[in-house]
Amino acid sequence: MTTSFINNNTIIIGAGPAGLAVGACLKQAGVQSILLEQNDKAGSAWRRHYDRLHLHTDKKNSELPFVSFPKEYPRYASRDQLVEYLDSYAKKFELDIRFNQQVQSAQRKEGQWQVGTQNAQYSAANLVVATGYARKPFIPEWKGKDLFKGKVIHSSEYRNGVQFKGQNVLVVGFGNSGGEIAIDLFEHGAKPGIAVRNAVNVIPRELAGIPILSIGIVQNIMPAWMADAMNAPILRAVIGDITKYGLRKLPYGPATQIQNDKHIPLIDVGTIKLIKQGHISVFQGVAEFTENSIKLTDGKEAQFDAVILATGYRPRVNDFLQDASHAFDNEGTPTSTGKESAIPGLYFCGYYVSPTGMLREIAMEAKQIGTAIAKSREKK
Ligand SMILES: Cc1cc2nc3c(=O)[nH]c(=O)nc-3n(C[C@H](O)[C@H](O)[C@H](O)COP(=O)(O)OP(=O)(O)OC[C@H]3O[C@@H](n4cnc5c(N)ncnc54)[C@H](O)[C@@H]3O)c2cc1C
């Protein structure tokens, strides 16, 4: 049965870190909001991530507005600790989260946002889209993929390596998920390979005991090329020559990569050591699948029992945002974030791939959005 709620201020779509942070900032500013979440718990994306996952960013630079991580948490919180933090965050601010509400349409009509879920209609003056940069798994098409007899899963479905013990497993993609899943497979007794299509940059999680993110924040005031020039000799000394192990190094450094390509370099939590020791094999990009092997872009072919696609995600806000095409690109990635978009009363939070960490960026954007919405209410 369809129910209808009229809410006069703000609807936030998504109760992940971004939605919760915006909800808290609005609450502190005395603005009423409701959050619509498609799953039955807050932070649901983090609940599904693989078991081994820890934040790659240190806790000081990963906290949401107004609430620090508990003192007893380690510098890099585990997945479960982050989930616990998000739960207590939602409780602390008494956020009004409507669970099991999957937004299917959102449209501005006569100055109000009309938002439809599978069984209800909501309306509000402002809409904050916080459905995550990683909303939809991205799965490339390859010739022969359907012929392959082994298991093929996206990294979003990977929990741990138990079921892959003793198997040859190819991880496709050398991002932070791919790098860590290859470690996890090795630790569970599988024989992992990693397919790396493009040239890469690798950075350590810490330098001389200082989180790499803190160094990035200090260097953020200088041009990317300058930060890269400063860091190059240190990175060479710490990471070594990755080209000896079949990897190709990007001709520019990590800061330029984030700025231009919008890709976070591999933050190494042990993958490179296992590659150097021969426990993780490096392959070129995937060209084609056969029944039980993968043909690679350099013409080689190798047999695998399973393939894990660490091939990333897409935000795809175009799946539900209607008549708003000038607020996102062809792939449904918002063209602005952390402020009012080109459409009145429409805000996005959490869509900037930041060199200083996405959670830190989300916290800053949430505060900006909270202030902007509170101010727009005062004007009326
Ligand atoms: C594996 C992985 C590791 C990461 N590690 C770090 C890290 O160490 N440090 C860091 O700073 N960042 C990290 N990030 C990036 C980023 O900080 C996190 O992804 C973070 O969870 C983003 O928060 P979010 O609220 O924007 O999105 P999400 O956490 O994805 O939350 C979005 C919410 O929206 C809901 N939703 C989506 N569509 C709808 C809909 N149509 N209707 C209703 N609800 C909907 C989802 O169910 C979800 O609860 C990592 C990302 C990934 C994928």
Image: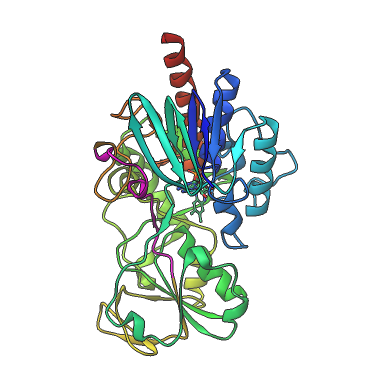
In percent of width and height, residue 209 lies at 59, 46
Say which residue appears at 26% left-offset and 55% top-offset: 251
Residue 348 visible, this orientation: no
In percent of width and height, residue 324 lies at 28, 37
Q: Nearer the viewer, residue 200 or 120?
A: 120
Left/right placement of residue 61 relative to residue 107 reads right
Q: What colour scheme does the image use?
A: rainbow
Quadrant of the image occupied by residue 48: bottom right
Residue 32's place in the image compared with 229, above or below, is above
Q: Nearer the viewer, residue 181 or 12?
A: 12
Q: Residue furthest top?
A: 379
Q: Nearer the viewer, residue 310 or 120?
A: 120
Q: Residue furthest front?
A: 1
Is residue 148 found inside the magenta-colored segment of the image?
no
Say which residue appears at 43% left-offset and 38% top-offset: 115
Say which residue appears at 41% left-offset and 64% top-offset: 174
Quadrant of the image occupied by residue 68: top right
The magenta span reads 309-325
Residue 86's place in the image compared with 287, above or below, is above
